[in-house]
Image (cartoon, grey):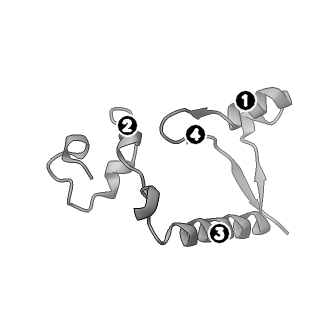
Amino acid sequence: MNPLYWGDDVEDFKPERFIDSDTYRWPRDAFLSFSAGPRACIGQRFAYTESVCILASLVDRYEVLLPENLMHKPFEEQKEKMLKWTHSITLIPTNANVRLRRRT
């Protein structure tokens, strides 16, 4: 990681540097988790597969519900709020809160 973006403690393990707050938003363009091209991470495919498995497991066990404030809104408004993103090097989704209810 580049000290110009991350500061002098760039080599220190600080996962909190990736958490946004009211006064700080980490530079999305400065970190590409798997890199790109011929030197891309060899574990990228495994990580994506594992993520899909975890997500499928959650959806199998829980019902995904809209947040209370969107429940009775028109579908177009729900869709606009839930599928909003920011364009950058990669698409960055905005916060889309959902509720999970255990399936019976």
Marks 1 and 3, the one that precedes in the sequence: 3
Q: Vertical placement of 43 versus 34: above or below?
A: below
| Residue 8 position within the rendered picture, expressed as x and y whole percent measured from the top left | 14, 49
What is the spatial separation of the Cα atoms under label 3 and label 2, in whole angstroms?
Answer: 27 Å
Residue 74 visible to the viewer: yes
Residue at point 84% right, 31% down? 75
Q: Mark 4 near mark 3, Cβ–Cβ under 8 Å? A: no
Residue at image location 69% in from the left, 31% down from the top: 81
Q: CA distance from mark 1 to mark 4?
A: 12 Å
Q: Amino acid at mark 3?
A: Ile
What amino acid is at disc 2? Arg
Q: Residue at x 24, y 48 (%)?
A: 2
Label placed on residue 25? 2
Q: Tell me residue 23's x, y (percent).
A: 33, 32
Q: Secondary structure at mark 3?
A: helix
For residue 95, the mark is 4
Measured Cα–Cα span from mark 1 to mark 2: 23 Å
| Residue under numbered circle 1 | 80
Q: Amino acid at mark 4?
A: Asn
Which residue position is annotated with label 3?
Answer: 54
Rendering quarter of residue 22:
top left
Q: Mark 1 or 2 closer to N-term? A: 2
Name which quarter of the figure residue 83 lies in.
top right
Q: Position of residue 37 (x, y in %)?
A: 45, 57
**In-image side of 92 versus 31 (left or right):** right
Q: Quadrant of the C terminus?
A: bottom right
